[in-house]
Amino acid sequence: MGDGAYVEVVLPGKVEPEGLELRSGPVPAPGAGQVLVRMEATGVSFAEQQMRRGRYYDQPAFPFVPGYDLVGTVLGSGTGAGAGLIGKRVAALTKTGGWASHVVLDAADVVEVPDGVGAAEAETAVVNGLTAWQMLHRKARVRSGATVLVHGANGGVGSVLVQLATAAGATVVGTASARHHEGLRALGVIPVDYRNDDVPARVRELAPGGVDAVFDHVGGRSVVDSWSLLARGGTLVSYGSAATRDDEGSGALPVVKLLGRVWLWNWLPNGRSAYFFNVWAGRAYAKNRFRARVRADLTQVFGALRRGDLTARIAAEIPLARAAEAMRLAESGTVAGKVLLVP
């Protein structure tokens, strides 16, 4: 049932990227209700950067195989999974386990990738596209004519967010370092230099009445400024704490602080709302509903790719065996789009 040798990348503990370990073994076999997927592309996300520091708030105990999502071809299926998926290209959210040549998944957790969308192209839009789509349409409910602020507009999630927001008819202001501004302007984004500009002051110049939505992955002081920039009726969606990536201590504490702020802000009688977004919300107690939502929303994102509303932004495609190099590149802050690992 296997196709080639099995290889996985293991995160053994709190290590530098060069401490990642490459292991090989037999290709795993799918059990009941499962499928075996040959990985064609997986990504390096901010989650893995936090995990190698032991700072992702619900990561498993070391050692484990990282890899938040993947795209690949179904090679085989276990009993009860049905044979209809064999040979199909599929995508899946995994949280961990994606950095491997072959991955066993529950058949109910894979989403078919439509014809005409390549593996690398699709991979840029799995966790990043799903996160962006759900924040934009399920949380902020952005409509045509709105003005939104996207922090990290050149990053993995940010670059998808700005394109989906533009396609929805919104005016988009995006923060990024100056070297990314030309590319953002080409996407119709109004860029703001977060390194050299006074971001709140510049955004107030652009939107004197406030913005309708802010998408903030930075946390810390940034999320406080983001809340202050909202217009009445506006929505803040916080989805990370990048500012604390290199801090010592508990990885959960920044998230707890963000949750506390969100709770407090939502009690204030000012017509604004705040969310802390977690793409896994609801899976623990409503798995079937969660799966249906993932399937519906990823299908929308893949549709945007096919229509050209969303262009895959691939920073690099690096072989799985060179995962350390890929991690270094993703952490450098010098690239736009997503760093991919490929077989």
Image (cartoon, rainbow, N blue to C red):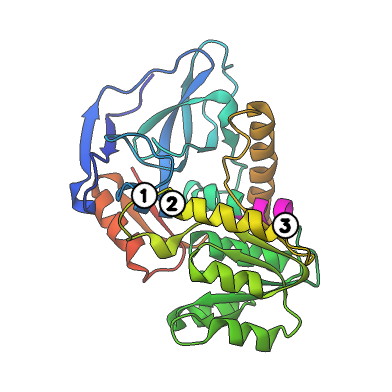
Horizontal placement of 239 versus 180: left or right?
Answer: right
- Percent across and percent down for residue 226 are 61, 71
Circle 3 residues within 10 Å: few <14, some 14–19, many ≥20: few
User: Which quadrant does the N terminus fall into?
Assistant: top left
Chain-order first, disc 1 or disc 3: 1
* Mark nearer the viewer, 1 or 3: 3
Q: Which label was assigned to residue 267?
A: 3
Q: Identify the main secondary structure in magenta.
A: helix
Circle 2 residues within 10 Å: few <14, some 14–19, many ≥20: few
Chain-order first, disc 2 or disc 3: 2
Label 2: element kind: helix
Picture layout, residue 208 above or below residue 315: below
Q: Which residue is located at x 62 percent, y 56 percent?
A: 262
User: Which quadrant does the C terminus fall into?
Assistant: top left
Q: Which residue is located at x 50 percent, y 57 percent?
A: 240
Q: Are marks 1 and 2 in contact (CB under 8 Å)?
A: yes
Q: Which residue is mark 1?
A: 250
Q: Which residue is mark 2?
A: 253
Circle 1 residues within 10 Å: few <14, some 14–19, many ≥20: few
Q: Are marks 1 and 3 in contact (CB under 8 Å)?
A: no
* Mark nearer the viewer, 2 or 3: 3
Q: CA distance from mark 2 to mark 3?
A: 22 Å
Residue 170 found in image quarter: bottom right
Residue type at numbered disc 3: Trp
Per the rendered image, the range of residues in magenta is 132-140
Picture layout, residue 119 above or below residue 235: above
Label 3: element kind: helix
| Count of numbered marks | 3
Residue type at numbered disc 1: Ser
- Percent across and percent down for residue 31 are 45, 14
Residue 291 lies in the magenta stretch: no
